[in-house]
Amino acid sequence: MLDAIIVGSGINGLSAAALMGSKGKKTLVLEQADAFGGAIRTQEVTLPGFYHDLFATNLSLFAGGGVMAALKSELIAHGLEFVPSSKPYCSVFPDGKMIGVVMDRNQTELNIAAVAPQDVQAWKLLTAKLGVLAPHLFPLLGAELPSVAAVKILIRAWRVLGTSQLLDLVRMLLQSSRAFTDEHFQSPEMKALAATWGMHLDYGPDISGGALFSFLESIGGQEFGMVLGKGGAKVLVDALCAVINTQGGELRSNTRVEEILIENGRAVGVRTSTGEIIKARAVIANVNPALMPNLLAGKEVSGTENAPEIEKLKDFRPGLATMMIHLAMDQLPQWVNEDARSFNYVHIAPYVDEMALTYAHAAAGKLPTNPTLVIGQPTVSDPSRAPEGKHILWIQVRVLPLEITGDSAGSIDGKTWDEIAEVYADRIINNLESYAPGIKSHILARKVLSPSDLERYNPNLIKGDSLGGSHHPAQFFFLRPMPQWIRHRTPIKNLYLCGSGTWPGGGVGGGSGLMVAKLLS
């Protein structure tokens, strides 16, 4: 009999299967789509020879995480190749200023000094602070919450840091990005550079909890750089699938699970859309928690005491939506500040107040006039993704409405993404023109993926939420996804959850897959 069925082949499901296989467990991964990888997909969606990461592209979390550490030799043997970047990101501003963060502390400080000399010392202090906190913070981010292991980490941190510094860390966990950046920086440019990272994770500048990510990601880029997959992020998926196959595991695409089977209060297998019954000792659901009630609608569950807890999962809130725009280019953008051409990410916010307006408009259902843009230039580090001399751009629009009620600029009509996606994408390209004049003339082809398209590609991306659920404090840390469904366990025996809707949240890291694999190995 199978030791586990994994429903969904996202990074965490594949990681769990590969890790369990390394311990001799027999696993089966079932995927409803025609390709494995969940929100990791690389395709030629514009022109032949231009390889675009449709959704996730940054593999830094995985490269430095526990799954890679455990399976490194096997993954490399099956073709996994990383492309590191020592120039991970920069922020550009309407007046042509740019601040670039590189893996050279002295150079980063020089870059900051050229725009915001008054903030160089604060950056140095935050860099030192990360060095002090990292030995305690990163193990906590990799520990099950709540757990005895997490408590031990906190006790060790208290002994080393003392009560004052530990409380300062707790304070940061509760701070907004605006409060954090106001506290540490004076210039609007440095405040924006840090706060933009909160927008990556559904943290508008005034949302409690955004400070931690603004701190970790802004300083972390300097300390750790960025990692891409050679030829596209799909290289990671292909390597994991190859490892699973080599171990004797099985993967099936185009196989939709209709129901998780429950007998005597235990998960015993699944029923597919074709009516096939597959039994296993355990079921791991690598799906958005809000979709779990659909999979647990069988009679065996509806009449039990677990039914109320299952229904509560429908209240698991998505983060705000995202649009992806993929461009095939005949050259890199001619940024007003030409140094931006050498960075993997270019951030356009441009300032904290604009981010706050964007977030407020999107939350109210209005199309933002100047949304935050994360522009990936992967061919800067990995020219293999495009024909010689050509380039691709990866544009993530943050953040957008889950339901459209209007346009903040009053110029776009329509209430569905299918009606207005291309017109709104035109707005984004027009916005880019002021930062990279002439960019339109260098676009060879484009592919727009609206929030509705994201959900069509992957049902877990509910209404275009790319994060697997909002990361706001009420459903994060030890509350993710919600009480009774924490620590990757469920109220139903032998049924486990993993994925970005569980701790440690979004990103291509494989952390929750690692935690589930430990429970079952």
Image (cartoon, rainbow, N blue to C red):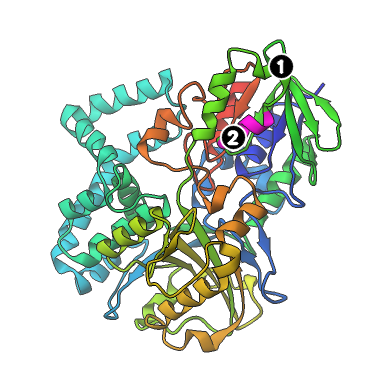
Q: Nearer the viewer, mark 1 or mark 2?
A: 1
Q: Position of residue 465 (x, y in %)?
A: 52, 50
Question: Which one is in front, 442 or 231?
Answer: 442
- Give me the residue at 36% from left, 21% from top: 151
Which three-letter amino acid code belongs to the residue tagged 1? Glu
Q: Which residue is mark 2?
A: 513
C-alpha gap between disc 1 and disc 2: 27 Å
Disc 2 packing (10 Å; few <14; some 14–19; many ≥20): many
Asked if the residue under mark 2 is in contact with the one under mark 1, i.e. CB atoms within 8 Å, the reply is: no
- Give me the residue at 55% from left, 29% from top: 515
Q: Secondary structure at mark 2?
A: helix
Picture quadrant where residue 252 is located: top right
Magenta stretch holds residue 388: no
Q: Is residue 493 above or below residue 215?
A: above
Q: Main SS of the magenta segment? A: helix
Q: Secondary structure at mark 1?
A: helix
Numbered range of the magenta stretch: 290-295
Q: How many marks?
A: 2
Q: Is residue 235 left or right of residue 201?
A: right
Is there any visible trace of residue 476 in the rendered image?
A: no
Picture quadrant where residue 55 is located: bottom right
Q: Which residue is mark 1?
A: 300
User: Mark on residue 259?
Assistant: none
